[in-house]
């Protein structure tokens, strides 16, 4: 793993249930961990049809250093912020189970 290639700052957010003062529950995203990552695009174009329009799915792979914070990240309940863009985590790869780096396969959220 080349540390010099980790030149993109990302923020990992966690989905939490917040209770207000009168007892209402709601989901809210809060910052969980911020770190540097290497980004790479997925090979091959993928398209889907949505509302009679064909749109490209933008997928990125984020490679980060292994730590106790990044090891706890799962596809359910976490997402990645890259600037103003939001990416849902599809899967987490432990890179041959060596506990040196993690690769998050993510897809851009369409808003």
Image (spheres, grey):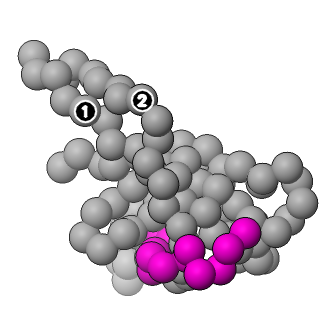
The answer to whether 44 is drawn above or below residue 72 in the figure is above
Label 2 vs 1, first from the N-terminus? 2
| Left or right of 81, for residue 94 | right
* Residue at left offset 48%, top offset 54%: 40
Badge number at residue 30 = none
* Residue at left offset 23%, top offset 45%: 110
| Left or right of 14, for residue 55 | left
Tell me the distance, in whole angstroms, between the alpha carbons under discs 2 and 1. 11 Å
| Left or right of 88, for residue 50 | left
Please state the horizontal and vertical placement of residue 70, each as a whole percent of the image: 68, 70
Label 1 Cα neighbours within 10 Å, binned few <14 / some 14-19 / many ≥20: few
Please state the horizontal and vertical placement of residue 35, each as a whole percent of the image: 56, 81
* Residue at left offset 35%, top offset 29%: 45
Q: Which residues are magenta?
A: 1-16
Element marked by disc 1 = strand
| Residue assigned mark 2 | 44
Please state the horizontal and vertical placement of residue 82, each as a whole percent of the image: 36, 69
| Residue assigned mark 1 | 56
Q: How many marks?
A: 2
């Amino acid at each position: 793993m080349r540390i010099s290639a980790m030149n993109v700052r990302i923020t990992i957010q966690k989905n939490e249930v917040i209770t207000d003062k009168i007892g209402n529950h709601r989901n809210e995203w809060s910052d969980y961990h911020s770190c540097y990552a290497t980004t790479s695009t997925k090979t091959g174009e993928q398209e889907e049809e949505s509302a009679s329009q064909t749109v490209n799915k933008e997928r990125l792979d984020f490679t980060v250093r292994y730590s106790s914070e990044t090891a706890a990240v799962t596809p359910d309940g976490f997402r990645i912020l890259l600037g103003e863009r939001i990416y849902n985590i599809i899967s987490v790869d432990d890179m041959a189970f060596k506990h040196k780096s993690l690769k998050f396969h993510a897809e851009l959220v369409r808003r």
